Image (cartoon, grey):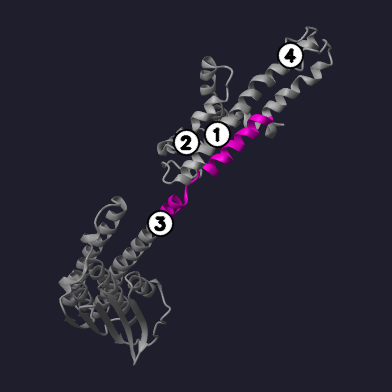
Amino acid sequence: MVRFLRPLLRGTTYTRLLHLWVPMLSVAFWMFIDPRTPWAPALFLVPLGLVAAVRRGEGVQARLLLTPGEAEPGISEAPAASWRDRGRTLLWLELRMVLGAAAMFATVWLPVLTFELAKCAWGEPPADVPLLDALAPHRSYALLAPFPLLALYGVVLGLGALITRCARWLLGPSAAERLAALEERTEQLLERTRIARELHDSIGHALTVAVVQAGAARAAGDPEFTGRALAAIEETGRAALEDLERVLGVLREAERPVSARPTLADAGRLLESARASGAKVDFEMTGAVESLPGPVSREGYRILQEALTNVLRHAGAVPVRVRVTVTGRELALEISNPLPAAPPTGRGGSGLRGIRERAALLGGDARTGPEAGEWLVRAELPLG
């Protein structure tokens, strides 16, 4: 019984009923003008439904009254963008008028019917109401009096659910709106993936350098070397904090430009950090790095950072050969080092996967794995 009456405690039940009543205001107003044509307001809906902004107003009203509190009700608040949207809006207005008339009839006459049956049970003759004017007073009508109220309960809930389903069907997003929403969602997912890669590359690199430096300083037992190691850890930590601030800035300000991110022109600090960790870096650059497009230069920096991080993490302080070549068509990065005793596989962690993803996003290619006794990372990023 409690479950049966629970809809009476929900505000949505009454807001949907209010939504059904609203179109009847125009009918009530028209009855003062010409009571012989109560259907006339439906004709005025034809030009009204063809106005683009009407769809937005109907969408806002439907979301407010039919689906209050729902985050994704499936009802659009955008104006009509095509004639198909206008046709759907017109059909919605006419359907809303019909269902509103049914709701108004039920909410007026069913309570009246209950009242008249109660009068007959009390011994009073019914009023001049169709279907009841021939009834004679009798106590047995007290058993029938609740049934119109039960019918009213069912009609209100049924029409409320029906008008809500029709709103999702006729006022739902168009194909263009669904495509735009899908593209926006895709952009958000790509941005989250990019932020995850940024954090992995910058913070992971800094922690790897700090661990390697601290271990080397502890093993060396040389105060001078320990001082250099601590200085390198401090510098790497500062750089990591700067990178972290840039990434968090993207979260705080969605429109913040990405031009503040490091590029290959800042590769010197990566090389110095690796050298300070004991690695012997043989670096060679060919071409004008400053002329690279921003996205290519920024992703190239991250690829180089991740490759050096992997060297320090898996191979330690070993010789590293870095080649950066800029041509008129592409940027080529090649980082190689001797294979460690337990070489990593090419299907390794998220760092190697991130290198390949970065290259793929720019239409390029990246290969990682053992080759001729060395671990090789080679990335080719097109400039176009």
x and y, in percent, of residue 265 in the image: 17, 71
How much space separates mark 4 and mark 1, taking CA atoms?
33 Å
Which label is found at residue 94? 1
Residue 70 seen in the figure: no
| Disc nearest the viewer among 3 and 2 | 2
Find the magenta span and give its range: 154-182
Considering only vertical position in the picture, is 99 above or below 29?
A: below
Left or right of residue 278, residue 91 in this image: right
Please give the residue where the numbered disc 2 appears in the rendered image: 49
x and y, in percent, of residue 332 in the image: 25, 80
- As for residue 57 lying within the magenta part, the answer is no
User: Which residue is most to the top?
Assistant: 124
Give the quadrant of residue 303: bottom left
Mark 1 or mark 2: which comes first in sequence? Answer: 2
How much space separates mark 1 and mark 2, taking CA atoms?
9 Å
Give the quadrant of residue 204: bottom left
How much space separates mark 3 and mark 2, taking CA atoms?
29 Å
How much space separates mark 2 and mark 4, taking CA atoms?
41 Å
Residue in the image at 25% along x and 68% along y: 298
Please give the residue where the numbered disc 3 appears in the rendered image: 183
Q: Which amino acid type corresponds to the residue marked 3 in the rendered image?
A: Glu
Please give the residue where the numbered disc 4 appears in the rendered image: 116
